[in-house]
Amino acid sequence: MKAAMRPLIALCLFTLPTFAAKEESVAQRLNEATDIFTEIMNAPDKSIPADLLNKAHCIVLVPALKSAAFIVGAKYGKGFLLCRKQSGIGWSAPAAVRIEGGSFGFQIGGSATDIVMLVMNQQGVDALLSSQYTLGGQAEVAGGPVGRASSAQTSGWMNAGILSYSRSRGIFAGISLQGSTLRQDLDDNQAMYGKRLDNKQIVTSNIRPPRAARKLLSELDRYSPRLAK
């Protein structure tokens, strides 16, 4: 039965970019990533805890991860990875990522979900800077806590390499993304920087960010200008 299902999974993943609607420009996705981050952080008592954001080494923002399902479910989305500068002050230019994954079960329908991931330690950073990473493989991934919590309340999550969140239909909550694949998107990197830079080159250098990323970087600096010790 499992072998018989493989062609359906492949078909679902192959057709998702088409289902995901017209291909948006990188600039549009950067604007959407900015909007979801700002809206989440402005939500009363439903934001990412400041203690966790301040200790995050990197952040991943994927606006409108698409999910399609007809017997076999699949996910597809494109977004951005940004990391702290080596000094710990300020954020790097954005690097493009795409997330893909499948799920089993009898389901019919479709939805779009915003995804946010906080990378909490160097192991998680190293995993996400590889060309392709299966979430939950090299670094532990856990659904993150929500709310303006203190250090005492969030300390239990500090051991996770990556904390993941979702927002769908106005509801913001921690989510498990175990088994989904995150990979760098060299085509979108070329669209932003004029050459096919890999993600490690972008986030570990002082490359100038694209104009469309200025607002996102400004918002990240506003809510978390430096890495907390």
Image (spheres, grey):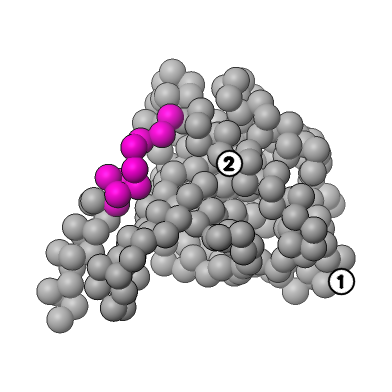
Dot 2 falls on a residue whose secondary structure is helix
Q: Where is residue 30 shown, x and y percent of the image?
A: 55, 34
In front here: 108 or 225?
108
User: Residue shown at 33%/60% (left/top)?
Assistant: 68
- Main secondary structure type of the part rendered in magenta: loop
The disc at residue 113 is none
> Does residue 51 appear anywhere in the picture?
yes
Q: Is residue 23 left or right of residue 53?
A: left
**Badge 1 amino acid:** Ala
x and y percent of residue 210 in the render?
57, 22
Instruction: Name the amino acid type tagged 2.
Output: Ala
Q: Is residue 56 above or below residue 206?
A: below
Figure quadrant of the N terminus: bottom left
**Cα distance between the residues tagged 2 and 1:** 29 Å
Residue 30, above or below 68: above
Residue 100 occupies quadrant: bottom left
**Which residue is pictured at 44% across the width and 18% down the height?**
194
Residue at image mark 1: 152
Task: Say which residue label 2 marks.
Answer: 33
The image quarter containing residue 6 is bottom left
Q: Residue at x 74, y 51 (%)?
A: 41
Of discs 2 and 1, which sits in the foreground?
2
Q: Where does the magenta region start and end?
A: 16-25
